[in-house]
């Protein structure tokens, strides 16, 4: 992507657009991961008996990307440190 | 205290807002955890045969899609792209409404096969009802954000309102990530 006229590659509109693209990519990965997780859980629910532990093992770590990348829970610690 | 908050620098206000929101979400987590735990306490891992598993999966996917569009809405406003923000907020609201329609279908089936008087029915309707109430309140908040956004509020330097509502929406999604296997998949 070429920088728009009047902006250097690291500032202004170009930097904002590149930051946006990066963030949107992260959001897409998290979404794809969670969709895959839902399908895996569904398959486990259909095929595995006594699956409580397995579903817990899938769901608890599986929810981490949502907390980390979408809700940005780490910002809480960073902002307190500032 | 309110006066001190009003005169505090923007970064300090933002930190206070963040902390307040996370404390609120933590208290909500305890509420959902209590109701989810009651399912295991009352029923163990028993699951009725009549449960509509595909509908549960579709509801999960719709809610996931809505949290993705909510994420996009926040990203767009944070990077100064107002049209993208408005479009994705509107998509999120539409998907939230679709989710509620699905919950309505789910309830009509639930009333037939395991009414609230039964053990599974009471857990099912409490948990889904509690979650649906959060979806409705999230939709109201998203509607406010959309209305304010249309009238020119929010921008890359001032989007706390959007961020807070979107975080709440992610929390609704997070709660569903645990409710879905608890009600539909555990055996």
Image (cartoon, coloured by chain):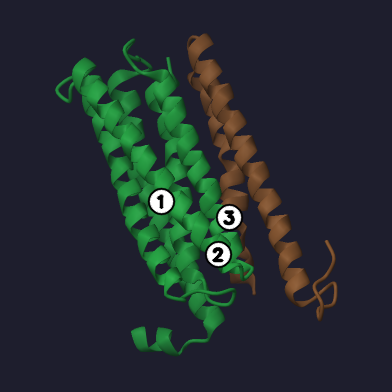
Expressed as whole percent of the image width and height from the top left, the position of residue B180 reads 42, 29
On the same chain, marks 1 and 2? The answer is yes
Q: Colour of chain B?
A: green
In screen coordinates, is B155 left or right of A17? left
Expressed as whole percent of the image width and height from the top left, the position of residue A13 reads 73, 73
In screen coordinates, is B20 left or right of A14? left
On the same chain, marks 3 and 2? The answer is yes
Asked if residue B177 can be seen in this view, the reply is no
Work out whether mark 3 precedes mark 1 in sequence or the reverse, and give the earlier one. 3
Asked if residue B164 can be seen in this view, the reply is yes
Which secondary structure lies at badge 1?
helix
Q: Nearer the viewer, mark 3 or mark 2?
A: 2
Expressed as whole percent of the image width and height from the top left, the position of residue A80 reads 59, 70
Q: Quadrant of residue A6?
A: bottom right
Work out whether mark 1 precedes mark 2 in sequence or the reverse, and give the earlier one. 2
List the residue tagged with mark 3. Answer: B72
Does the CB distance between marks 3 and 1 fall below 8 Å?
A: no
Which secondary structure lies at badge 3?
helix
| Residue at x 79%, y 76% (from the top left corner) | A11
List the residue tagged with mark 1. Answer: B93
Neighbours of disc 2 within 10 Å: few (<14), some (14-19), many (20+): some
Q: Residue furthest front?
A: A5
Neighbours of disc 3 within 10 Å: few (<14), some (14-19), many (20+): many
Q: Nearer the viewer, residue A64 or B72?
A: B72
| Residue at x 48%, y 49% (from the top left corner) | B170
List the residue tagged with mark 2. Answer: B83
The chain painted brown is A
Q: Nearer the viewer, mark 1 or mark 2?
A: 2
Work out whether mark 3 precedes mark 2 in sequence or the reverse, and give the earlier one. 3
Mark 3 belongs to chain: B
């Amino acid at each position: 992507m070429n920088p728009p006229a009047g902006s250097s590659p690291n500032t202004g509109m170009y930097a904002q657009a590149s930051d946006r693209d990066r963030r949107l990519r992260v959001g897409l990965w998290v979404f794809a991961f969670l969709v895959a997780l839902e399908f895996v859980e569904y398959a486990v629910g259909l095929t595995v008996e006594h699956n409580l532990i397995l579903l817990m093992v899938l769901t608890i770590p599986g929810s981490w990307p949502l907390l980390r990348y979408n809700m940005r829970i780490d910002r809480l610690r960073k902002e307190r440190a500032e | 205290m309110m006066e001190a908050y009003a005169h505090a620098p923007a970064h300090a206000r933002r930190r206070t807002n963040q902390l307040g929101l996370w404390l609120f979400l933590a208290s909500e987590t305890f509420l959902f955890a209590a109701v989810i735990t009651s399912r295991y306490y009352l029923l163990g891992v028993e699951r009725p045969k009549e449960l509509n598993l595909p509908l549960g999966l579709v509801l999960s996917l719709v809610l996931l899609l809505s949290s993705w569009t909510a994420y996009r809405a926040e990203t767009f406003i944070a990077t100064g792209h107002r049209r993208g923000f408005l479009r994705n907020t509107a998509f999120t609201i539409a998907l939230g409404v679709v989710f509620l329609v699905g919950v309505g279908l789910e309830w009509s089936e639930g009333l037939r096969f395991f009414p609230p008087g039964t053990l599974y029915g009471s857990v099912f309707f409490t948990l889904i009802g509690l979650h649906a109430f959060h979806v409705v309140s999230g939709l109201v908040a998203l509607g406010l954000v959309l209305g304010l956004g249309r009238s020119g509020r929010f921008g890359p330097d001032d989007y706390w309102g959007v961020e807070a509502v979107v975080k709440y929406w992610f929390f609704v999604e997070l709660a569903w990530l645990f409710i879905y296997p608890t009600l539909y998949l555990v055996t």
